Amino acid sequence: MTTMSEKVSEKLKRSVSKRVSQSVFDGSRLRVVLLVDVYDGAQQQFLEAYEQLCNQVASVPGHVSDQLCQSIENPSQWLITSEWESAPPFLAWVNSEEHVRMVEPLHSCVRDTRSLRFHVVRETGGDAAMAAADQRRLQASPRIGDGVIRHALTFTVRPGSEAEVAKILSNYASPEPKVDETTRLCRTSLFMHGNRVVRAVEVRGDLLAALRHVASQPEVRAVEEAINPYLEQERDLGDQESARVFFTRAALPAVHHVTAEELAEGERFALYYPARPGCGMRLAELLAQRDEAAAEETGSPVLRSTIFQRDDVVVRLTDQRAGAEVDVTLPPALTALLDGEAVRMQLVTDRRSAEA
């Protein structure tokens, strides 16, 4: 029997077009590549920590297999590849508190990591019958992007401090947009609802390099230090481990983006959808389906839409045609997944680089 999720995934797979630049909901297999730089002399410690982690990951729903490889040129460089049935179960795990606890043993022996995620588009070799059976789990066709990587951070501040935090976050000098010859910071949009803050960034080039560049700028560092006393989750930016844990928990990945063919400028809004426990990914998937349908409609007020999701926090960033009101109403199938009401967030600041 075909489940509702499979039907949605199949529909999304069939409707992939040049308008969709990113989506995790097409049902295709996922390959995750983790590049790891291990401290000199800590290779054995890293291997033991990995084996412990590997045994735990094997029981995570959606996990298929993984490989650990060590560089033949530099013993400090390692590569971990894993395969997952699809992107949603991986994202549900990697963004969970369980994952934060699982990877703790690695921190003392790892200097740096870089995670890359790919849908499987084509596959060769292996058993022909098995390959034919798995064909439905390959990405149907290449997606056409716009060269922009979208990411967001979200965190909460202490109730009663919202006005002071908004003032601090709105008054800062924009950082230098040029990161290097290939990476540019294009746009930063910051919203608040109650005591929740959402900061969305758009980058051309290397997202990780851009985030590190922004974090190192004196004007940004000053703002981050100024809001530290108001954060519900304490952090010490001078302590690498404290900062790493904070930003890991604050990460709000983009799970779907769609752009209409008309690339006119519009007014930017952010909508916050508090999902019921365990319903965040499903809610994001149904919102993605609605946005794809809207992008196909002639005269739709939606020019672009990006959905960010982590656990039960779902945020939809949308650019609307000038003068068009953003619609927060949802059909019963989606409101049933909400723990509260969908709300329009307050815009604190929206800054676009002149070089974007």
Image (tube, helix red, strand yellow):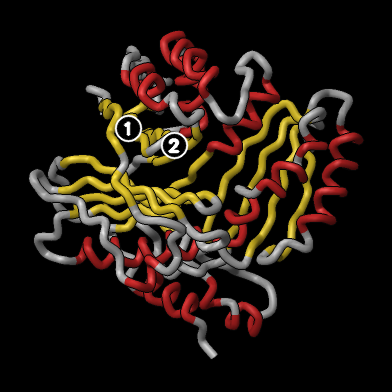
Residue position marked by numbered label 2 in the rendering: 196
Is 64 on the left or on the right of 32, as rendered? right
Residue 184 location (% of width, % of height): 36, 26
Looking at the rendered structure, which numbered label has been put on residue 189? 1
Residue 50, picture quadrant: top right
Foreground residue, 148 or 238?
238
Q: Position of residue 171 (x, y in %)?
A: 32, 15
Q: Secondary structure at mark 2?
A: strand
Res 297 seen here? yes
Question: Residue 93's x, y, as percent?
Answer: 65, 54
Residue 88 position in % (x across, y down): 55, 61
Q: Is residue 191 above or below residue 330?
A: above
Drawn side of residue 256 relative to residue 123, left or right: left
Instruction: Decide: is 332 above or below 349.
Output: below
Q: Earlier in the sequence, mark 1 or mark 2?
A: 1
Residue found 41% across the figure and 56% down from its top = 340
Q: Residue at x 84, y 56 (%)?
A: 55
